[in-house]
Image (cartoon, rainbow, N blue to C red):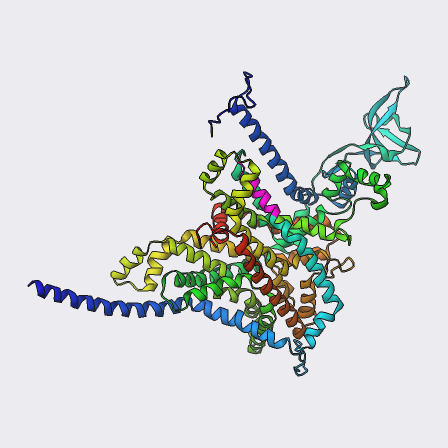
Amino acid sequence: MASISMKPGKNENTSPFYSADLRKIWVTGMVTMFTAIICVVYLLPFGNMALLSVKDSEQQVASATGSILPLSSYTFEYEGEEYDIYTVPLPQEDGSFVDTEMALVQTGRRVSQFVDVNNPEAGLVEWEGNWRGLEPVTYLDPKWSNFPDAWNGIEFPRVFRNTLYIAIVGMIGTIISSLLVGYAFARFPIPGKNIMFMILIGTIILPGQVTLIPTFAFFNWLTNSMESVLLAMGLPLTLREPLLAFIAWIPLTLPHFFSNAYNVFLFRQYFMTLPKELDEAAMIDGAGPLRILMQIIIPLSWPVIIAVGLFHFIFAWNDYFNPLIYLLNSPELNPISVAVQIFNFQYGARPELIQATSLMAMALPIAIFFVAQRIFMKGVILTGVDK
Amino acid sequence: MASGQVMELDASEEKQKNRRSGLHEQQRRWGWIFISPWIVGFTLFTAAPILISLYWTFTDYTLGSEDAVNFVGLTNWQRLFTDPLALQALKVTGTFAAIAIPIFLLVPLGMAALLNAENLWGKRVWRTLFYLPYMVPAVSGIFVWQAFLNGQSGWLNRMLRFFGIEDFLIWLSDAPFIGNYWNFEGLPNWLQNEQTIATAFLIMGFWGVGNAMLTMLASMQGVPKELYEAADVDGAGAWKKFRNITLPMISPVIFYNLVLVAIGMMRYFEVPYIVSRGTGAPNNAAYFYNIHFYKTAFTAFDMGYGAAQAWFIFILSMIITLALFATSARWVFYAGGD
């Protein structure tokens, strides 16, 4: 890279300050600058969200035409009342103007009454001009209380518990089942294995709608009949409530105990990189397939197990459609995605709360991504590039 | 002595063979056990529902209704092609897909090419930051964009005003000649405006290209350096190298993403549903196919007609996937030879 050979006679620059390295640094700087600008524009909605989430309604009205920051006016107490302070260009005797910090006491269309903050004893001062054109004297005043409001509004602890249950039960299900199925595809001589693998991969591009309606009807029947059995049993309320929740969440958890194409693919690819000699050595020692799996394969597979677990956790956290249709009749069991949407439809007039809840819903997935980004990206690349 | 040894060897080989076939049997049995979760799941949650929903397309099954289920022949299918809302939904979805599919491939391709540039500092940081929005839950992302695209206070319009683009466009509509064709009365409220809502959805979709970008980037990094060095010797420029080396070498990943984006368009639901509050407003410009499907199946519980809509999208996706695979032979280049 360092040896960029100059072709003689072609754009040769003999200037003492010119060198290939210098030119390279310049190009690198330009490319990096360009990337940075694109990146900032790409991530700009985050900024909009962050600033809007710490404004109150008054600040939102003010920032529709003024600064984007959450500002508040300084106020001044005059004769027992609070008044906003503005910077007023006061005309002097010599015809010049001096900017003075003054509190607006009485507004008028052409003439307004002010009082000098530093000299209130002078009393009211008349100022000619439209006060709306004046700059208020402001300070940064983020309304952090929006976050507790949003937290209480969507009842975050309950919603978080619901989401966590759905995500973790499904995660356990998909790890166990996909691991077993991936192991089968990677290691065992099953007749028709290749065709089955093709079908498995084919399910990735299957539009979910075509299986949805009978599946929905099935789960509707299943949960309804389980519920009526449970209610007929006449259990005490403390026992009944968690069991009802367990039943209502079955459509969101049970399907994951039957493996998933992406995860099976990940496990299979990973197992195929493990040397077969390991299994064979154990087999000669008389170990059965289950023992080989538990004692040899799984201890070597933690990276892929963690990756699959994280993928599922993020999927479950973000999933909107399934809880939307399956939990329609029990809104108190909704996970965070649907809870945020319902809350925000109710509080459409409070954009700051909408942004605060959105921020709360994305915090955990983004934190997980930052902590585990290498595992994450490896998994994405493996499923995307190797197929 | 020697022959005895040979005989013994033969016998042990025989034994081993027996043991091997016994082992093979055992292996096969365990294979079936391990694969059974998928087989059960596939039968229960994929194969059976597909067939049942095909059957339901010919019935008037309504969930929760006491009436007997009647066989209605092709009524549901007829309805699908005459129902004005279904036709509107197909039009909206088809138009959007036609524009969105190329854009949702070109944008991640451009990002990947930029992040793969030889002269770029801090590649890993940029890669993380460009991937980041993909981690945002759809629901959060939609509300964040709704604020960003707000007509008054949203930062997009604020920026366009700040850089004088709004004034420029207004000035253009008063200009001679251009003004005859261009009428501009101020920046739109992107998500409330029939004309701009599709564009707004496209812009929002830029936050969903992370996976495509990452796979394309990884694939670009896997292109052998020698190919570029050979092209350097031939004096090829950057564009020529990209066009003639990078693109063919990463074409399998582009194809993979093309299939996923095309299928994704058939699943497109959350954004129009939440933005329009389930209505498809303004003036049904956001009335996507899946909103119609959702309303039919899960609001009216008209499972027969809903199943017909589902099966229609299933058939369509099969046709599109097959068509894509058929054309792939012409432009997808598998370096491995398979």
Direction from residue B10 to residue A265 in the image, left or right: right
Residue drawn 55% across the image and 41% down it: B242
Front residue of A33/A351: it is: A33
Residue A373 point in image, percent of width and height? 50, 46
Q: Is residue A236 magenta?
A: no
- Vertical placement of residue A292 versus A33, above or below: below
- Vertical placement of residue A272 versus B47, above or below: above
Front residue of B6/B171: it is: B6
Residue A48 point in image, percent of width and height? 69, 43
Point out the residue furthest to the left here: B1
Direction from residue A179 to residue A208 in the image, left or right: right
Quarter of the image with the N terminus of chain B in it:
bottom left
Count of residue discs: 0
- Vertical placement of residue A64 versus B273, above or below: above
Residue drawn 61% across the image and 71% down it: A213
Front residue of B183/B162: it is: B183
Residue B335 point in image, percent of width and height? 46, 49
The secondary structure making up most of the magenta span is: helix
Q: Which residues are magenta?
A: B106-117
